[in-house]
Image (tube, helix red, strand yellow):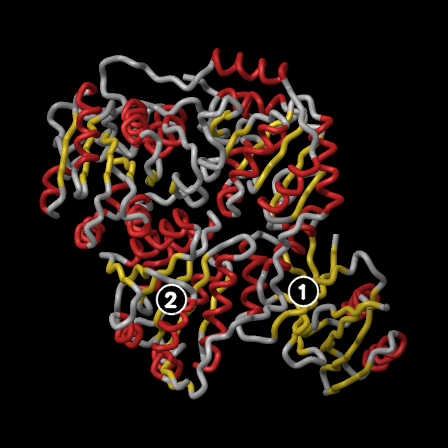
């Protein structure tokens, strides 16, 4: 099962290595990890998507809490949250397929951010199911490159 | 006050109450050493940085204070690594200070550069690279606080040379610090303590399983009180030895792989397991799915939330300091008697006591019993790792906390002798033993120089069987007797499948008696059982380091034994 942890950490060098090292040394798998400064410049937020059963997730939470530079671990299984991911997709195109691809982008409220004779780059933001759906639709045209930010999440309350 | 980085380090150590540092100088710590020998802090120059790390660890285990070691950058720091990992696995408060190349050169593969914070990250509780002298006072304060509080552990402070040389205009050692991500829980939650109390009162066959946490939180007295008040038998882990008097009729001694039969049987039978400062290590539980099958309640008191339900699912966790929680528990729990349960245990004890063949051969277990007898159980015992360590755990009767100094979690051969240096530095007037095997003692034997120069009258008892005995035992039991490279007298001409040293084998490699004498210590060789007592008594009278080479039965095995991965009930008795 996928699970999102939102972790507030000291904004210092070495903290990312500490958290990443914890996952590798304990054999936990990270699906995605996003880091950025918060409104308090001394604090960063890491959004970590992890796969595992309840026992693994409990250990992840406890081990994260044990890291001295971790200030707070928020576990989104207990509360409503909103999550988003941004994806850039470069799709190969020609004069015939270009309008079809643009149509698909529009339906998904995605943006065309770059265009050349042979390729079109689309920016899409949303929840995972939407992202998977648009990737699925675009596959037939040939995806040249795909870049995902990983999921970020914030609690509703 | 205006001070240089190096002066700040020494001043901070004095303010933290540090009396002794174990270490080794080098180019990147020369500035600190330049201040060190003008300070009141004693310094023990070891012969290898690993010895310094173990000595600091031994000092910490024996005193309960933070042990401090110091080394230079690169190889100096990497030589500390085994010692730091040893301290980390056993939750021992150690602060390791390492020099680093100047900040301007970090990352350039400079001479004697190693990424010390990177290397030690997974084997420390926390670590620091000091990039600015402004941060130095706070970092040292934090390091000592983190090392000794909560679940203790080692902290590394890596200090570049230019930071040691930089001047801080307004130096003041901080009185208080605030680490927003670190707030250990000392008080147990009262609801959880109440639940524990009810479970204990309900239990018919309760058992206490006590670990190193009891020693770390100085909770031995409270533990004894609980055990006696509610008549609960107590078994301890290797690190918990001394946390409960083994002379008590409630003592089941050690449990697990080489624990007593009665402790392991009791574990299989108990209906209420009370784990205190222990972490359900695989050497304790055996096959996890068959561990304590009848325990309706498992109470787990531990200061580290991540230790709870990591290996065994626990229904009554109490997060808090053992001493604190036990005090509360003792106040509210009602006294109880368990005559039937104790009778059952006494029968097991009678039927399956710890035993070895008591003939006229010199057996290692006998040496341990005699060490107990001549020291009247009052010595501080350090051990290396292997068979001799298990025999010590089994046959010495530990009655007081901080008298068994041994590497449990990491199982570090070569730990005991340097650790005994740390212990004897802390307690110059006590009898300190290092019980060793002929394999382990050679891993840090260079520290003989350190012990001699510091006039430490350590008693080293080598149980010499010419083998790496524990591995040989496994080869005998599980690998069809294929003694592949576990013979310590094997030479280049030996057949590859030789299973037993014979007459032609070299007798003493090295000759420990001569080796001791080469250092100015006293060497003794004991080959007869009848000489053991006299040798030990004589050794205790000698105010010098004594190295006793006991030539014991070569193929003696450690029993009982639960084979790795098997259930405790599959214990092999002899």
Instruction: Report, in whole angstroms, how far the alpha carbon at label 1 lies from the one at label 2.
Output: 36 Å
Q: Chain of mark 2?
A: B
Instruction: Pick out the residue farthest to the right.
Output: A107
**Picture quarter with the N terminus of chain B:** bottom left
Residue at 86 percent across and 75 percent down: it is: A104
The location of residue B193, given as percent across then percent down, is 71, 41
Q: Report x, y in % for residue B436.
A: 28, 37
> Relative to B568, is B239 on the left or the right?
left
Q: Residues within 10 Å of mark 2 (few under 14, many from 20)?
A: many
Identity of the residue drawn at 31% across and 28% down: B368
Vertical placement of residue A154 versus B498, above or below: below
| Viewport quadrant of the C terminus of chain B | top left
Task: Classify residue B115 by image quadrant.
Answer: bottom left
- Element at label 2: strand
Q: Which residue is mark 1?
A: A32
The residue under label 2 is B97
Q: Chain of mark 1?
A: A
Q: Is residue B491 visible?
A: yes
Q: Is residue B357 above or below residue B537?
A: above
Residue that protrudes farthest toward the front in the picture: B331
Taking depth in this image into account, of B13 and A148 the one nearest to the observer is: B13
Discs 1/2, front: 2
SS state under label 1:
strand
Q: Which mark is residue B142?
A: none
Q: In the image, A129: left or right of A70? A: right
Residue B290 seen in this snapshot: no
Q: Position of residue B387 (x, y in %)?
A: 34, 31
């Amino acid at each position: 099962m996928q699970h999102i942890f939102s972790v507030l950490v000291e904004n210092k060098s070495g903290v990312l290595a500490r958290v990443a090292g914890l996952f590798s040394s304990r054999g936990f798998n990270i699906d995605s990890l996003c880091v950025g400064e918060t409104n308090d410049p001394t604090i960063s937020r890491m959004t970590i998507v992890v796969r595992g059963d309840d026992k693994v997730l409990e250990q992840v939470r406890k081990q994260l809490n044990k890291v001295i530079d971790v200030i707070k671990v928020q576990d989104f299984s207990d509360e409503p949250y909103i999550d988003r991911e941004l994806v850039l997709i470069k799709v190969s195109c020609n004069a015939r397929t270009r309008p079809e691809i643009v149509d698909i982008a529009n339906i998904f409220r995605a943006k065309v951010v770059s265009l050349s004779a042979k390729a079109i780059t689309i920016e899409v933001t949303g929840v995972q199911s939407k992202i998977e759906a648009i990737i699925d639709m675009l596959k037939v045209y040939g995806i040249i490159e795909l870049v995902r930010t990983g999921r970020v999440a914030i609690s509703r309350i | 006050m205006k001070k240089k980085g190096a002066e700040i380090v020494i001043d901070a150590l004095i303010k933290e109450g540090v009396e002794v540092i174990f270490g080794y100088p080098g180019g990147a710590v020369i500035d600190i050493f330049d201040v060190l020998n003008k300070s009141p802090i004693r310094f023990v120059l070891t012969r290898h940085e690993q010895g310094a790390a173990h000595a600091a660890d031994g000092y910490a285990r024996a005193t309960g204070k933070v042990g401090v070691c110091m080394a230079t950058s690169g190889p100096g720091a990497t030589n500390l690594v085994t010692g730091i990992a040893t301290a980390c696995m056993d939750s021992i408060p150690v602060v390791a200070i390492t020099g680093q190349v100047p900040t301007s050169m970090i990352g350039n593969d400079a001479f004697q550069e190693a990424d010390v914070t990177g290397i030690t990250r997974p084997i420390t509780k926390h670590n620091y690279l000091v990039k600015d002298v402004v941060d130095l006072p706070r970092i040292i304060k934090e390091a000592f606080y983190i090392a000794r509080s909560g679940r203790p552990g080692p902290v590394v402070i890596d200090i570049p040379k230019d930071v040691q040389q930089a001047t801080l205009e307004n130096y003041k050692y901080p009185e208080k610090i605030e680490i927003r991500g670190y707030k250990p829980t000392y008080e147990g939650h009262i609801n959880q303590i109440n639940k524990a109390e009810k479970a204990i009162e309900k239990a018919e066959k309760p058992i206490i399983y006590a670990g190193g946490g009891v020693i770390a939180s100085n909770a031995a007295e409270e533990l004894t009180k609980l055990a006696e008040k509610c008549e609960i038998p107590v078994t301890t882990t290797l690190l918990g030895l001394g946390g409960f008097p083994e002379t008590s009729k409630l003592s089941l001694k050690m449990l697990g792989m080489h624990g007593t039969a009665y402790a392991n049987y009791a574990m299989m039978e108990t209906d209420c397991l009370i784990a205190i400062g222990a972490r359900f290590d695989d050497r304790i539980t055996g096959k996890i799915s068959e561990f304590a099958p009848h325990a309706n309640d498992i109470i787990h008191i531990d200061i580290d939330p991540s230790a709870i339900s990591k290996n065994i699912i626990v229904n009554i966790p109490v997060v808090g300091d053992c001493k604190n929680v036990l005090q509360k528990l003792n106040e509210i729990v009602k006294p109880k008697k368990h005559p039937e349960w104790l009778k059952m245990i006494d029968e097991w004890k009678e039927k399956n006591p710890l035993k070895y063949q008591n003939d006229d051969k010199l057996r290692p277990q006998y040496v341990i019993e005699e060490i107990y007898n001549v020291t009247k159980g009052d010595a501080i015992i350090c051990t290396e790792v292997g068979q001799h360590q298990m025999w010590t755990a089994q046959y010495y009767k530990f009655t007081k906390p901080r008298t068994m100094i041994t590497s449990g979690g990491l199982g570090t051969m070569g730990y005991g002798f340097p650790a005994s240096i740390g212990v004897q530095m802390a307690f110059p007037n006590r009898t300190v033993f290092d019980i060793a095997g002929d394999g382990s003692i050679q891993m840090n034997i260079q520290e003989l120089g350190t012990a001699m120069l510091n006039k430490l009258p350590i008693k080293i008892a080598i149980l010499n069987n010419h083998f790496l005995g524990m591995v040989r035992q496994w080869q005998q039991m599980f690998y069809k007797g294929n003694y592949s490279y576990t013979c310590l007298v094997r030479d280049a001409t030996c057949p590859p499948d030789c299973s037993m040293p014979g007459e032609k084998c070299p007798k003493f490699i090295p000759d420990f008696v001569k080796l001791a004498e080469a250092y100015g210590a006293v060497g003794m060789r004991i080959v007869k059982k009848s000489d053991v007592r006299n040798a030990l008594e004589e050794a205790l009278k000698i105010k010098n380091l004594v190295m006793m080479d006991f030539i014991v039965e070569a193929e003696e095995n450690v029993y009982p034994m639960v084979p790795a991965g098997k259930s405790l009930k599959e214990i092999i008795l002899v």
